[in-house]
Amino acid sequence: MSNLRLYRKACNGEGPAMRNATITAFARSTHGTSAVEFALLSPLYFLLMAGMAAYGLYLGTSHSLQQVAADAARAAIAGLSADERHEIALDYVAANAGTYPLIEAEHLTVGARDGEAGRFVVSLDYDARSLPIWNLFDGLPLPQVTIVRRAAIRIGGF
């Protein structure tokens, strides 16, 4: 038998002693604690999971963008002149950017040029406003809306 039942039997279920015993038994009861803990912690947990998913998409997009820039620079190195390298890089990005994960080609701005020290540089600017990270709560520290990635490759041989 539970403590409450024994106490009720001793007090004949009457009086202030019985009320105190009922309150004490209620306070010591562990029934439903899991539900209360879930109710208190689940909003924080779901917010944390949503934040991880949103930041994961942002970082995945950033990584894909870096891959596009590096691949365009590798393709452009076949050009013999600065203009040809520029055209090859632009054509590569226009033809292939949509095939990379998480990248929408219409949000992409491409720049390609011969850089200093004999390097060819491909720069990509991506407007990331369509990503779900911007739908999180205001006041959270968020990254830049425009993702900027560059890739440089050496022109010529060794």
Image (cartoon, helix red, strand yellow):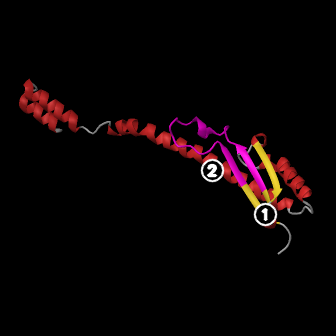
Work out whether residue 41 or residue 27 is closer to the camera in this orientation and state it: 41
Where's residue 114, x and y in %? Answer: 83, 59
Picture disc at residue 137: none
Can you identify the residue that label 2 sits on? 59
Q: In the image, is 91 to the left or to the right of 66?
A: right
State the separation of the CA atoms marked 1 and 2.
Answer: 29 Å
Residue furthest bottom as drawn: 158
Picture disc at residue 116: 1
Residue 64 seen in the current view = no
Does the stretch in magenta take in 155? no
Work out whether residue 1 or residue 33 is closer to the camera in this orientation and state it: 33
The residue positioned 86% from the left and 59% from the top of the image is: 76
Where's residue 156, x and y in %? Answer: 86, 69
- Secondary-structure class at tag 2: helix
The residue positioned 91% from the left and 55% from the top of the image is: 83
The residue positioned 40% from the left and 40% from the top of the image is: 41
Mark positioned earlier in the residue sequence (1 or 2):
2
Numbered range of the magenta stretch: 122-149
Q: Amino acid at mark 1?
A: Glu
Where's residue 4, x and y in %? Answer: 16, 34
Q: Residues within 10 Å of mark 1 (few under 14, many from 20)?
A: few
